[in-house]
Image (cartoon, helix red, strand yellow):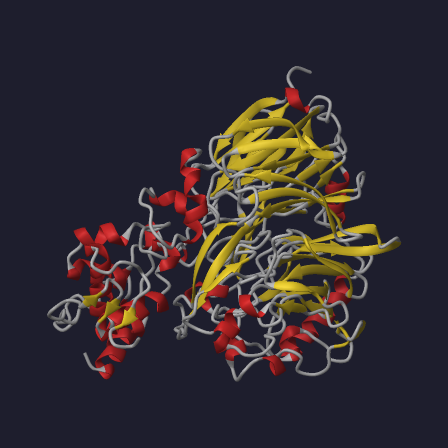
């Protein structure tokens, strides 16, 4: 998705949040997943997109509720949740939140919305057990 | 962010000062003077948490039994305590912030108030949906809701008298603090340091709810209500005027506009000085590299004139915070001997692990010493400059972003968090519930988006190494000399407010859920303990009704220390954050939300 589109969508989301699912009808959101979903070497070195997913995880402070290793805190374990949720369900949950349960909406966070596929790839890699710890580094950066 | 013209403030402040001059809050003072009541959250305006009641005492507290219990119906962290005025107890809950008025004659609920609040504020409340209780004055009960609405209720009927919006929850400006009534004003603060909220305290007329003044923690002098020539601070070994732009000079660019310095602690008031005292929290973000400078006046102790909001003096404890040592903890006022000299003192146990004794009349720094020997991020506070001497190894700014700085003591929870200490005029000592926890801290670059988290560091916490293995201590502190007198180890952080009484006892709760009373003269002597339904993060209080003394406390685990409890944690893993050390709590307690009231049998 290009940036202009993203801005329009997030501006729209501000108005429409919690009334309708503003992005649910958008044909190009969530953005497609990549093939392969992630690449990981030695359990901690990941491809640039998955690295971007990790940065998104930190930027959004997901660890505040889901724990520094995604193991769960006030919020549920994402190591478990990512075994249950489809990509679309995951994306919609992040966008709209689950307010009554204490999960906020990230619909106005451009960093999260535009990286939702990368965030998913990173967390799925953690949930699959392929990525061995929360902190990762970019392949070839060492 | 709303910024109003400061001249308008000053004008309205002056008018209010003239009209409110003769009216110290006689009603609150009268209620406090009668020890049968528990009329304010701390029992008094000095934040001493001390009661003159003696029926329950060191000799008989061991026989204490549960008199009655009450469930708030909310299973989240319960901080603060109820109030008791005459024959009525005012009980509050965590979000959705219910208030119950209970008739002590019949234990019947006279009225119940439950505000409707947007559930979007739930995730915005850092560290659980706690509320630290209500205030009472002149027939009104004041509730500071999570969504920032400040409400005055008719104490007889529970009907709304007025309500006013104190912040913008859409930007993360929510509330957990208790409102405080000083003179003819109800004073409140704001939370949201992890959302880039610019902190302030605001005073509202208790009759109308109209805002009288509002003083920011950071930014231009006029908006902080600082007079560069008259407001003083501690520098070069003396009290001196802060000078112009004392805050702006210490920030890069416009970072102050999202600069934190929130104000969610317990405030105190000295009638003789007509001054209120409180602390400001961490600068935003937690990544220090993004905000070079001292970030004044985050992390500071403040004295403000209650009529005008004008700043008398201010002292920054942790310039350029690199650890989230959020300086909001209570300011306890006590007239004690400091290094042998009679002093109108202010005593403060900061998150950064240092206990400060100041001259509250002028802000002179008298004592600054570690109240946990494990504190390692600074060697000491230089008494001339008032600045902590930071150890390079533990500087998360010097180590830089994306580097994990390990073994910092204390953890971001602080050697003490909001759980308030007590002062016992009979022993002259402070009774301090503490954390004994250290951390690894890794800052990283973060971008600001309005209404989204703005944190910028990952933390892992663990019990202080090389100690007793526990995560807390209950200590007595000699504030005149800056020395620990006794230290009683606890398995978990002591996250409950202390109470001392003229009966020679000191009581506090534990995260496992025990109410404990110890001998005030020797706190290692446990005289009483009882397991309440859930972990305790509330504050112990006492009152008398129909000739009988009662001691009470909320139980209901939560808050930062208890955040792991809701998740059903079973798996172990490498980086554990707050959960690591506290995980074992699951062997002792589950969520709760109830009040337990104790008394002696018979009579």
Residue B153, how many percent across, how many down?
A: 56, 47
Q: Is residue B98 above or below residue B379?
A: above
On the question of residue B74 being in view, the answer is no
Judge by depth and name the residue closer to the eye, A65 or B405: B405
- Residue at 40%, 46% (x, y): give it: B564
Measured from the top left, where is residue B432 in percent x and y? 66, 45
- Which residue is most to the right? B341
Q: Residue at x 31, y 61 (%)?
A: A134
Q: State left or right for residue B478 relative to residue B140.
A: right
Q: Which quadrant, please, contains the N terminus of chain A?
A: bottom left
Q: Is residue B415 left or right of residue B455?
A: right
Q: Nearer the viewer, residue B358 or B437?
A: B437
Q: Quadrant of residue A93?
A: bottom left
Q: Quadrant of residue A90?
A: bottom left
Number of numbered tags placed on the structure image: 0
Single out the residue that lies furthest toward the top: B602
| Rendered position, B439 above or below A22 | above
Inspect this view and state whether residue B256 appears: yes
Return the x and y of residue B554 as percentages of the image width and height: 54, 37
Q: Nearer the viewer, residue B536 or B73?
A: B536
Left/right placement of residue B453 relative to residue B4 reads left
Percent from the top left, x then y, of residue B400? Answer: 47, 74
Quadrant for the C terminus of chain A in the image: bottom left
On screen, residue B83 above or below A39: above
Image side of residue B499 versus residue B584, left or right: right
Residue B509 location, quadrant: top right
Which residue occupies the foreground of this view, B374 or B346?
B374
């Amino acid at each position: 998705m290009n940036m202009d589109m993203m801005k329009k969508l997030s501006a729209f989301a501000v108005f429409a949040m919690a009334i309708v699912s503003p992005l649910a009808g958008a044909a190009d959101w969530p953005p497609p997943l990549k093939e392969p979903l992630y690449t990981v070497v030695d359990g901690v070195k990941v491809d640039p997109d998955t690295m971007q997913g990790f940065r998104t995880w930190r930027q959004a402070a997901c660890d505040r509720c889901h724990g520094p290793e995604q193991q769960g805190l006030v919020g549920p374990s994402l190591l478990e949740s990512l075994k249950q949720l489809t990509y679309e369900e995951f994306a919609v949950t992040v966008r709209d939140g689950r307010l009554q349960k204490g999960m906020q909406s990230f619909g106005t966070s451009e960093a999260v919305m535009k990286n939702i596929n990368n965030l998913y790839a990173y967390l799925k890699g953690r949930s699959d057990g392929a990525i061995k710890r929360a902190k990762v580094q970019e392949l070839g950066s060492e | 962010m709303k910024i109003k013209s400061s001249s308008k403030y000053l004008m309205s402040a002056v008018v209010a000062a003239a009209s409110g001059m003769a009216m110290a809050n006689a009603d609150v003072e009268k209620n406090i003077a009668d020890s049968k009541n528990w009329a304010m959250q701390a029992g008094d305006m000095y934040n001493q948490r001390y009661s003159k009641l003696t029926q329950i005492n060191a000799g008989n507290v061991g026989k204490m039994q549960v008199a009655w219990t009450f469930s708030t119906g909310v299973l989240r962290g319960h901080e603060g305590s109820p109030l008791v005025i005459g024959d009525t107890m005012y009980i509050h809950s965590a979000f959705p912030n219910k208030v119950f008025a209970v008739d002590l004659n019949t234990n019947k609920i006279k009225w119940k108030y439950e505000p409707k609040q947007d559930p979007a504020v739930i995730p915005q409340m850092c560290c659980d949906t706690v509320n630290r209780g209500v205030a009472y004055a002149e027939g009104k009960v004041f509730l500071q809701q999570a969504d920032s609405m400040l409400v005055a209720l008719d104490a007889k009927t529970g009907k709304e008298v007025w309500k006013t919006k104190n912040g913008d929850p859409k930007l993360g400006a929510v509330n957990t603090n208790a409102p405080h009534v000083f003179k003819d004003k109800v004073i409140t603060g704001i939370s949201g340091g992890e959302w880039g909220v610019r902190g302030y305290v605001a005073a509202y007329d208790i009759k109308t709810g109209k805002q009288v003044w509002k003083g920011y923690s950071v930014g231009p002098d006029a908006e902080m209500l600082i007079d560069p020539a008259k407001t003083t601070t501690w520098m070069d070994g003396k009290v001196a005027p802060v000078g112009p732009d004392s805050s702006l000079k210490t920030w890069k660019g416009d970072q102050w506009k999202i600069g934190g310095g929130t104000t969610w602690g317990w405030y105190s008031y000295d009638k003789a000085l007509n001054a209120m005292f409180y602390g400001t929290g961490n600068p935003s973000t937690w990544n220090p590299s993004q905000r070079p400078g001292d970030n004044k006046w985050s992390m500071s102790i403040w004295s403000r004139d209650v009529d005008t909001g004008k700043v008398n003096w201010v002292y920054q404890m942790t310039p350029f915070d690199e650890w989230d040592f959020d300086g909001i903890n209570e300011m306890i006022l006590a007239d004690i001997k400091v290094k042998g000299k009679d002093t109108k003192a202010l005593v403060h146990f900061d998150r950064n692990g240092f206990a400060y004794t100041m001259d509250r009349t002028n802000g002179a720094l008298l004592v600054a010493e570690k109240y946990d020997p494990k504190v390692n991020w600074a060697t000491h506070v230089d008494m001339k400059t008032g600045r902590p001497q930071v150890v390079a190894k533990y500087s998360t700014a010097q180590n830089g972003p994306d580097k994990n700085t390990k073994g910092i003591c204390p953890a971001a929870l602080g050697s003490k968090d909001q759980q308030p200490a007590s002062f016992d005029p009979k022993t002259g000592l402070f009774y301090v519930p503490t954390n004994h926890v250290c951390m690894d801290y890794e800052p990283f670059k973060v971008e600001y988006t309005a209404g989204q988290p703005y944190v910028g560091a990952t933390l892992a916490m663990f019990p202080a190494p090389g100690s007793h293995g526990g995560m807390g201590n209950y200590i007595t502190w000699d504030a005149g000399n800056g020395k620990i007198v006794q230290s009683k180890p606890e398995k978990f952080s002591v996250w409950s407010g202390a109470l001392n009484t003229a009966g020679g006892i000191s009581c506090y709760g534990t995260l496992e859920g025990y109410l404990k009373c110890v001998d005030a003269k020797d706190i290692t002597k446990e005289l009483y303990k009882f397991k309440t339904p859930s972990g305790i993060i509330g504050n112990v209080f006492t009152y008398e009704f129909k000739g009988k003394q009662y001691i009470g406390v909320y139980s209901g685990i939560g808050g930062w220390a208890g955040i792991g409890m809701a998740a059903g944690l079973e798996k172990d893993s490498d980086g554990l954050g707050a959960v690591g050390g506290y995980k074992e709590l699951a062997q002792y307690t589950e969520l709760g939300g109830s009040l337990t009231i104790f008394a002696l049998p018979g009579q």
